[in-house]
Amino acid sequence: MRACLFDLDGVLTSTASVHAAAWKEAFDEFLHEHDASAAPFDIDRDYPAYVDGKPRRDGVRDFLASRGIELPEGADDDAPDAHTVSGIGNRKQGLLLEVVKRDGVQPYPGAVRFLEAARDAGLRRAVVSSSENCQAFVEAAGIEDLLEVRVDGVSVREQGLHGKPAPDTFLAAAQELGVPAAQAAVFEDALAGVEAGRAGHFGFVVGVDRAHQADALKEHGASVVVNDIGDLL
Ligand SMILES: O=P(O)(O)OC[C@H]1O[C@@H](O)[C@H](O)[C@@H](O)[C@@H]1O
């Protein structure tokens, strides 16, 4: 391996649960307004299956489709209470930022050690996230200097890339680093993310199990599963 391609939320920073909680609140508010008898968003089942690891609007669309609901896309600046794909995404974004402003963004100590060891070993390093908050979270976590390339939710939008589970974002990062996919390792905690690693034929796919889903990570494409990437040192 000559390069490491790291997902952010749940792999480098402990923000996966903050995203999941913000999604639950946003979807539950919407579902209640849409149909007061609707079952609430199930964070243990709905989140990994339909939302985790995907670009924001893909997550909204895929979860709603699982409930047989189709909404108009709406506009980027839709109000958070708009019943549109963008409106629900904006509602989640507001809730997420409230928590992050209050609590900050923490990197996992094992991830920082792994990034430093990879740098010292001469491995190329990229962050590959579906999140449009990626740059802000990387900076807030203080790990910007350990990463050379960033492909994120903003890249997906601006460059028209297919988001995870498609391999495009990982392939774009490997290309920017000048390393073929077969010589790059993917590090992912989301089922959509390990699927992207498998679809891109990367040399190695490390599943990071933050949600007691080691078997599912393997089924979706992980070559190996660890609790924290620091465990690999
Ligand atoms: O809404 P954002 O910050 O653009 O993030 C999109 C996705 O980014 C991923 O990193 C998170 O795991 C998902 O929970 C999130 O939905």
Image: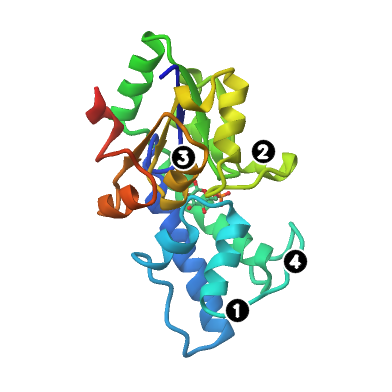
The amino acid type of the residue labelled 2 equals: Ser
Percent x, y of residue 138? 50, 32
- What's the mark number on residue 69? 1
Circle 4 or circle 3, nearest the eye? 3
**How much space separates mark 4 and mark 3, taking CA atoms?**
31 Å
Of helix, strand and loop, which one carries label 4? loop
- What's the mark number on residue 155? 2
Q: Which residue is mark 4?
A: 74
Of helix, strand and loop, which one carries label 2? helix
Q: Nearer the viewer, residue 69 or 19?
A: 69
* Mark 4 CB near ligand 1 (8 Å cut): no
* Mark 1 CB near ligand 1 (8 Å cut): no
- The residue at 60%/44% (across/down) is 132
Q: Which residue is at the far right?
A: 75
Percent x, y of residue 184? 46, 25
Circle 3 or circle 2, nearest the eye? 3
Percent x, y of residue 30? 56, 75
**How much space separates mark 3 and mark 1, taking CA atoms?**
30 Å
Circle 4 or circle 1, nearest the eye? 1
**How much space separates mark 3 and mark 2, taking CA atoms?**
18 Å
The amino acid type of the residue labelled 4 equals: Gly
Q: Which residue is mark 3?
A: 197
Percent x, y of residue 130? 56, 45
The amino acid type of the residue labelled 1 equals: Ile
Write down the quadrant of residue 232 in the picture.
Answer: top left
